[in-house]
Amino acid sequence: MYSFQAIIRRNVSNVTHQFEKLGYVGNNLANYNTKGYKSVNFEQMLTEDGYLTAAIRSDYAQGSVMITSNPYDVAINGTGFIPVVSEDGEVAYTRDGAFKQGKNGYLVTEDDWIVGEGIKIPANCFKFEIKPNGEVYAYDTNESISGKKLGTIPLVRFASQENLKSIGMNKLQATEESGEAMLVKDHDCFAQHNLENSNANIYTGVSDMLRLNASMIAGMRMMKVVDDMYNKAINIRE
């Protein structure tokens, strides 16, 4: 049998969990248009004593792929990540292939992290091609048959990608639980002129948000009712 204090304490804990889950749902909806974004699920479980507990898991399911007219755009078909390096030498991994030509001609992310070990695209080349295995070639003219190899966009995988650590800006870092990055060889996972969309489901997200909002309102009303009953019980005793 629960006391008034125990009922209030349990409801406060449960409403706090619901509010935290609402934050994750809102973040997924906010990143619906972020290329390569993977949704984060806040999975709740009810314990025997009536308290909510939760586990946070990332959903690495493939997002839909859209065709673009930008030759710098690259999508990954299947599992894997592209290593990128900051100006300070920090290494991270991403599935957002919305690249561009940065300063000094290097292939970089939208926030200027260098792709791979550095792939410099000549300013005067007629066109460049990113092959499915990640090799990048530059061509001098439209009639050129064999281009000049500029480098290779690496593809890496992890033993446990669910344990990668998010550092923001659609980038991840390896942890002890995820294991070290393993270079994938002899693959055909890259698609130039393509971008992977977010795998966040807007319909599920809106439904979850409405349900959580109703749940929190009900929980706060319950706390108000119990608090009123508690105050009346004190007054009766006095």
Image (cartoon, grey):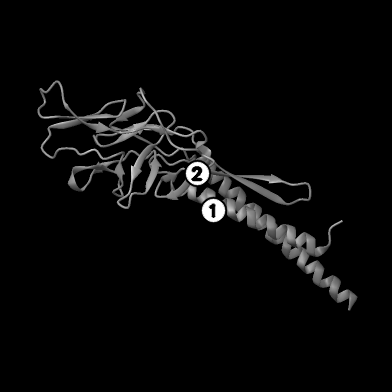
Residue displayed at 59% across by 54% down: 20
| Residue depth check, mark 2 versus mark 1: number of the one nearer the observer | 2
Gap between marks 2 and 1, in whole Å?
A: 24 Å
Amino acid at the residue labelled 1: Gly
Q: Earlier in the sequence, mark 2 or mark 1?
A: 1
Amino acid at the residue labelled 2: Thr
Horizontal side of residue 87 vs 165, given as left or right: left
Q: Residues within 10 Å of mark 1 (few under 14, many from 20)?
A: some
Above or below, comparing residue 6 to residue 198 in the picture: below
Q: In the image, residue 220 lies at what x, y percent?
A: 68, 61
Residue displayed at 16% across by 32% down: 127
Q: In the image, residue 229 lies at what x, y percent?
A: 81, 67
Instruction: Give the number of the disc on residue 23.
Output: 1
Q: Residues within 10 Å of mark 2 (few under 14, many from 20)?
A: some
Q: Nearer the viewer, residue 181 or 193?
A: 181
Q: In the image, residue 110 lies at what x, y percent?
A: 30, 47
Identify the secondary structure beneath mark 2: loop
Q: Is residue 34 visible?
A: no
Q: Is residue 209 visible?
A: yes
Residue displayed at 30% across by 29% down: 134
The quarter holding residue 68 reads top left
Above or below, comparing residue 74 to residue 84 in the picture: above
Disc 2 target residue: 175
Q: How many marks?
A: 2
